Amino acid sequence: MSKARPLLFIVILAAAALAGAAAELPRLSARGKNIVNAKGEVVSLRGMNFGGWLMMETWIPSIEMEWHDHLPRLAREVGIEPELRAAEKEVGGFDDDKERIQDYIPRVHQKLQSKVSAEKFKAYLDLFAREPSVFAAKDLDELLRARFGEGGARDIWDAYHDKWITETDFQLARALGFNFIRVPFWYRWFEDDASPYTYKEYGFRYLDRAVAWARAHGLYVMLDFHGAPGCQSPWDHTGELSHARFFATPEFQQRCAALWKAIADRYRHDPTVFAYDLLNEPFSARDVQNWTEAHDLIYDAIRSVDARTIIVMEDGYKLEEPDYRKTGFFPDPKKLGWENVVYSIHFYSGWDPEFTKGDNTFDHGKVLRELVRVGKLEQKRWQVPIYIGEFSTMHDLPNDLAGMKMIMAEFNRIGWHYSPWTWKYVNDTGESSIWGVYQFNPLWERTPNLHRDSKEFLLNLIARLGTENFSLHEPYGRVLREVLGQPVRAAK
């Protein structure tokens, strides 16, 4: 990783990006297996995710310790960290696909109780009660409000949202060769749970900025509903951990559809917003029917005000399940009356030990071949464009950058659209990683303690999160420039 780039270089990049920006972006649409512009020319969408911005994932900017680091910190203060580690080992790892964190931690505590004195166990539990883990954005928001009041919490969120992504990030993304930005967002910036169907301008303020900045620099925008009311998956990037109630609760689905309608009504005339990604990783759908009913509701709500913008629908990792890998998952869009739709898949190569080889490399090719197989199956069945909305090789093992290059080059070859995860990353561990194209350059002194640190400390820390303190991961940047510059090919 190189040192932070001087401001002059950023200005030069900005000027270059502006010089190449189109005066007006043509409207895009899905036609068969491809996406085309108003002239009918095939377009290859090669984008970037602006993760951690309007849907906070605390690990990306290192704003808060994750629970598996927070519990040892508390145990260390009481003098029982080795015993806690032993208890965790006996219980086994937390599987967020299958288990609730609210059930897992008490099991760890039960094991811990048998290993320490009653006095120390009580001291630990008392500390845990005063300083519970911040699992996701909702916990963070509630803690800020409890400590600093509504106004203080708003000051912190405003500072973060104003700093994490700015126009400079759009300029730099354009300079690398990306042609669109996927913007994840959280429903709570638009709607309070206490006042459903009443929309706030707060979220729209930032979406408006994103769209304006993208338009100024020749970039399209995909709006991604990352955190829906009730949570469409059990994972923390919905805004809550282990609270997946969306697909079992019609009211949450109605609220999501109504908010999408309001968003579509606002941006329907702007071709810069080329696509609506209805639900990020809708993992918790019970089956195809449950998934289809929810997506059909949202589709109809959007189409009641916007007949032209592309609609993106994700499988939620269902295509990794053995049965769906054989037969496919997505429904027939024609039977449902869905038009101008794109089917999307996410995958993260590097997480499964099965594919790790003895030389400390990962068989990304094997994973890629299986992804392409199931994706082509769906594309052949339904004659729709395929979009890989998130992917990464995640680490900096010897072949991980080569893996990213291979993956994106293959998507280019077969005419698929894609956007790797993610743009910026604060690495608080010091370990090498390619999570972020831009990575925090100064030493990250410590992850803040949101239970104890002052508002002033938090604001000063957030002030350091501007892109001027991040630097391009140069090897990753070289890979991106190469693959993003490859010629456009139609999907066959």
Image (cartoon, rainbow, N blue to C red):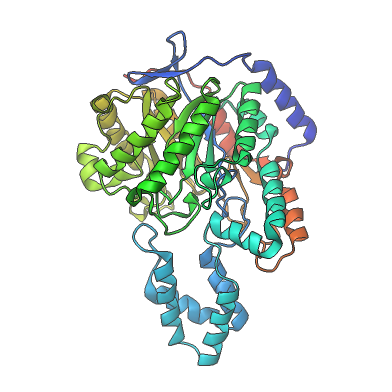
Residue sitting at 41 percent across and 26 percent down? 304
Q: Position of residue 489 (x, y in %)?
A: 41, 18
Q: Position of residue 148 (x, y in %)?
A: 70, 61
Up/down of 309 relative to 361, above or below? above
Q: Position of residue 100 (x, y in %)?
A: 39, 64
Which quarter of the rendering shows the C terminus? top left
- State the count of labels: 0
Q: Quadrant of residue 10?
A: top right
Residue sitting at 52 percent across and 65 percent down? 67
* Residue lying furthest top: 39
Up/down of 338 relative to 154, above or below? above
Up/down of 146 relative to 44, above or below? below
Residue 193 visible in the displayed image: yes
From the viewer's perspective, tell me whether residue 470 is left or right of residue 115.
right
Residue 280 visible in the displayed image: no
Q: Position of residue 268 (x, y in %)?
A: 51, 23
Which quarter of the rendering shows the N terminus? top right
Q: Nearer the viewer, residue 226 or 166?
A: 226
